[in-house]
Image: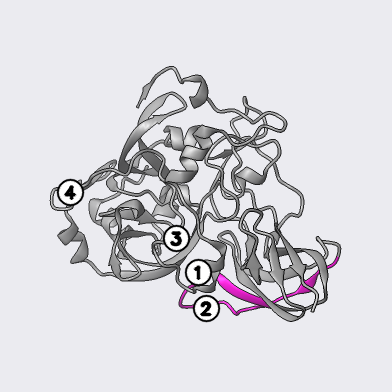
Amino acid sequence: MTTTEPTTRGRARIAGPGEGIGLDELALATRNHGLPLEALRYDVTPPGLHYVLTHYDIPAVDPDQWRLEVTGAVGRPLRLDLDDLRRRPAVTARVLLECAGNGRARLEPRPVSQPWLLEAVGNAEWTGTPLAPLLEEAGVSPGAVDVVFTGADHGVERGVEQDYARGLPVAEAMRPDVLLVWAVNGAPLPPQHGAPLRLLVPGWYGMAHVKWLTRVEVLEHPFEGFQNATAYRVKTEAHEAGAPVTRIAPRALLAPPGYPDFMTRERFVSPGTVTLTGRAWSGRAALTAVEVSTDGGDSWTPADLAPADPAHPWAWRAWTCPWDAVPGRYEVVVRAADAEGLQPVEQPWNRQGMANNLVQRVPVTVLER
């Protein structure tokens, strides 16, 4: 990593009162895309509808020349090509991914960055091989603390030139469900999803699932790279170190009912029984409930939450709730709870807009007969 003087636009900042989204944020929004919320109907998200966040450029990686290095505090460093990995036992896992910045654009004041609303999610089937046996084969040092995963994407962030790299504690990296992935939904990874190889860390926010993976390095000290020490921290003051972002907080999303207004996305439905549907998830603890409000959060009705699927413990779960809709204007709100707590109805603000699971609010007009 090298440090340069960040430009004014490259510095971390909070938007001023009433400041609209700028051209720099709009440029990020056109490069990165989210899940159209009507696509919550799919149990498995098609790759083209799955959210994408790319920090720098999508790198041009020749899969025939690509190699993965396992280095650092290991007894036997490894250098593997794709065929080496594909000869190993393969696992397919259905896993919910969510960007740690999901919901950032709805915060007030707004942290200036990728302006996610609620759409930075996806639930796909990923195929690869478990990481732990490779680390065991390499011989991880008894004094190992962190494992660092480095991608081929390179750029400057807040004045720091870097390859994108994230560290995990050794215990997390050695989990049996952490995978080195080369396929999604039965097809090779597309470029935007990390081809030829990416990391999959079920239950963690998306920053941990390093794409275009080139190196796995074992360290005997905590990793202090930018993406761990500076980015992806929950803090309210600029001078704070903050708490690291790790596992996904509970969230429920509503598949917007009826049909939308083009600009406002307000929904219109006919009167009568409307079946509200959506998905819910948590990466930190087991889901316990989903509740729905049609009066902006003044009262709540329990939704029918699909049972957990032992075959897919890290996937989202469907929920449904009938609504006897009479003509008028409504604000539909949904919230999830897991074994550690309830999704908040008031914003949990922080400077980077991280791990914000503020409830979704959807304006709905029920038409006259």
Which residue corresponds to mark 1? 315
Q: Amino acid at mark 4?
A: Asp
* C-alpha separation, residue under disc 2 versus residue under disc 3: 21 Å
Q: Which residues fall within the magenta stretch? A: 299-320
Instruction: Decide which of tag 4 and tag 1 comes sooner along the chain.
Output: 4
User: Is residue 111 magenta-colored?
Assistant: no
Q: Amino acid at mark 2?
A: Asp
Whether the residues at callouts 3 and 1 have beta carbons within 8 Å, the answer is no
Which residue corresponds to mark 3? 50
Task: Find residue 283 and report its image quarter.
Answer: bottom right
Q: Amino acid at mark 3?
A: His
Q: Secondary structure at mark 4?
A: loop
* C-alpha separation, residue under disc 2 versus residue under disc 4: 38 Å
- Residue at 51% x, 24% y: name it: 9
Split into 4 quadrants, where in the image is the N terminus? top left
Instruction: Decide which of tag 2 and tag 1 comes sooner along the chain.
Output: 2
